[in-house]
Image (spheres, rainbow, N blue to C red):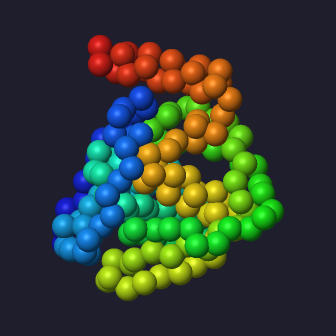
Amino acid sequence: MTRMAVRDILIHPDPRLKTPATPVAEVTDELRALADDMLETMYAAPGIGLAAPQIGVMKRILVMDCVKDEEAPARPMVLINPSVVWSSDEMSIYEEGCLSIPDQYAEVERPSEVEVVWTGLEGEERRERFDGLWATCVQHEIDHLDGKLFIDYLKPLKRQMITRKMVKLKREKARA
């Protein structure tokens, strides 16, 4: 039984959050352990998605679980080298938040349905169509792998305001 660990989540602004992640060359036990840590970190936060760059690991891997119903079984997913291969013309707007931008939320418009191809933990190719919250979450997390944050979709003034709040939060945390 491997010991899972909750990792520290980077807070914006951090240059690593704006840096595109490197594709994963092969699925190793080390990568599987990273995926376990990422799920543990995401659930502890608590959040519904987490990309490796958010914990300072510059690899194209993300985890998500958008099951909100306490009665329903969890559905932890690990996506390695994910890419959107199809997106709907229909758009939806969700109020998004981010573990790297705590307590800040804003409406972001994205395709309401996407089809994603990725590599699974056994090295197999996976493909699934996502809609609703799952579609928003997978697009948000893939953006992280590309060095993009949800606030990049906002108007400059709102983005600057949120960034200033995060700078202040980081200063306060550093003093604590």
Q: Residue furthest bottom?
A: 124
Q: Is residue 107 left or right of residue 13?
A: right
Report the residue at 40% width, 40% height from top.
Answer: 17
Q: Position of residue 75 (x, y in %)?
A: 51, 71
Quadrant that contains the N terminus? bottom left
Q: Is residue 125 visible?
A: yes
Report the residue at 43% width, 54% height from top.
Answer: 145
Quadrant that contains the C terminus? top left
Relative height, residue 3 to residue 20 (above, below): below
Relative height, residue 137 to residue 159 (above, below): below
Q: Which of these two is toward me, 161 or 97? A: 161
Q: Position of residue 67 (x, y in %)?
A: 59, 64
Q: Name which quarter of the figure residue 169 lies in.
A: top left
Report the residue at 39% width, 78% height from top.
Answer: 120
Q: Which of these two is toward me, 119 or 7? A: 119
Q: Is residue 69 visible?
A: no
Q: Is residue 109 left or right of residue 56?
A: right
Q: Which of these two is toward me, 166 or 59? A: 59
Relative height, residue 31 to residue 170 (above, below): below
Report the residue at 43% width, 19% height from top.
Answer: 167
Q: Position of residue 154 (x, y in %)?
A: 66, 34
Q: Position of residue 128 (x, y in %)?
A: 58, 78
Q: Name which quarter of the figure residue 151 lies in.
A: top right
Q: How many marks?
A: 0
